[in-house]
Each structure stands twice: as C-alpha cells, then as structure tokens.
Image: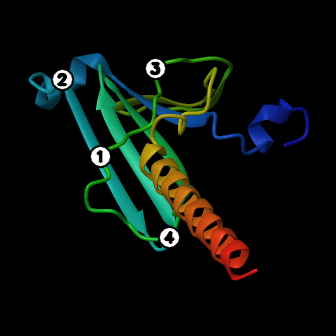
Amino acid sequence: SRGLSTWINQETGQQYFELECVPQNQEHYKDVDILASKVYFQEVICIIVYFKGSFYVTLSASVDDQPLLDMSFPDVSSKGRGFQIFSYNHREFKKLMLWQSERSVWETANRAVLERKRREAEERASRESVERETEFDAD
C-alpha cells in the first residue's frame, strides 16, 4: 500500500465499496428501486445494497448475537474521497471503487447495538443504586 492514502489502511467505519454496473446491460434491474441484503457469516456482517446501477458493500465485525429484527443498514449516500480499485472490461460491471464517506457508514446502522448497550448501562446503574441504598440502610 506504499504511496496510497492513509485513510485506505485505517479502519474508521467510513469506508465502503461500490461496484458500478454498465447501465445498458442492467435490463434485469429495470424495475428495482432498491435491493438490500444482510448476511451474517461467522464473525463478519456483509451488507450489500443495489441502488441506481451500483452495488454498495460494507463489511464489519459481528457483535454478539444476530438479532432477527435488525433492520438497520449503513448510510452509503455521502461519497468523500475515492479510490478506483479496478476497471472491468465486462458486459455487466464497469468499475470497483473504495469510498470514504464523510461520516461513519455505521453511525445509523448500529442503532440496535447502541440501544442495547444503553439499556444495559441503565440497568447496571439502577442495580448499583439499589445496592448503595441497601448498604446505607444496613448501616
């Protein structure tokens, strides 16, 4: 990675991939507004979103369990710096890009995890408060 920007080698949660498709050869997606998939594989979450002729992909570490009602998806709408990884001579695919968004793509997607951690912290604080009151009453 010598000579590449340092943001490419840093895991900040701001990076995502875009696989741009050849517009003329996307007839099978003509009636698709958006397509989204979230796959949990061992300790990795792979999210793929198809939107306006491109596939957007994020990879992240899986945290604890895999909630069935986790409907959150990353925000890949803000493109900042980009790096073209590969240009294809293919009838379906045009190029593969790595983007750095202006904010973490997981800022909104991790709501379920953050909410669970917030509830756990509140429960812990409540238990500690009760324990302190019990100790005070015992004295």
The quarter in which the C terminus is drawn is bottom right
Which residue is disc 2 drawn over? Answer: 33
The local secondary structure at tag 2 comes to loop
Label 1 close to label 4 by CB (< 8 Å): no
Vertical position of residue 79 compared to residue 6: above or below = above
Vertical position of residue 78 compared to residue 120: above or below = above
Query: Alpha-carbon neighbours of circle 4 within 10 Å: few (<14), some, or many (≥20)?
Result: few
Mark linked to residue 77: 3
Please state the horizontal and vertical placement of residue 115, each as a whole percent of the image: 46, 49
User: Alpha-carbon distance for marks 1 and 3?
Assistant: 17 Å
Please state the horizontal and vertical placement of residue 58, each as a whole percent of the image: 50, 44
Q: Nearer the viewer, mark 2 or mark 1?
A: 1
User: Alpha-carbon distance for marks 2 and 4?
Assistant: 32 Å
Name the foreground residue: 4 vs 58: 58
Label 2 close to label 1 by CB (< 8 Å): no
- Going from the N terminus, do you reach mark 2 or mark 3 first? 2
- Going from the N terminus, do you reach mark 2 or mark 4 first? 2
Which residue is disc 1 drawn over? Answer: 71
Asked which colour scheme the image uses, the reply is rainbow
The amino acid type of the residue labelled 3 equals Ser
Identify the residue shown where x is 40% and y is 47%.
47
- Going from the N terminus, do you reach mark 1 or mark 4 first? 4
The amino acid type of the residue labelled 4 equals Asp
The amino acid type of the residue labelled 2 equals Asp
Q: Nearer the viewer, mark 3 or mark 4?
A: 4
Which residue is disc 4 drawn over? Answer: 64
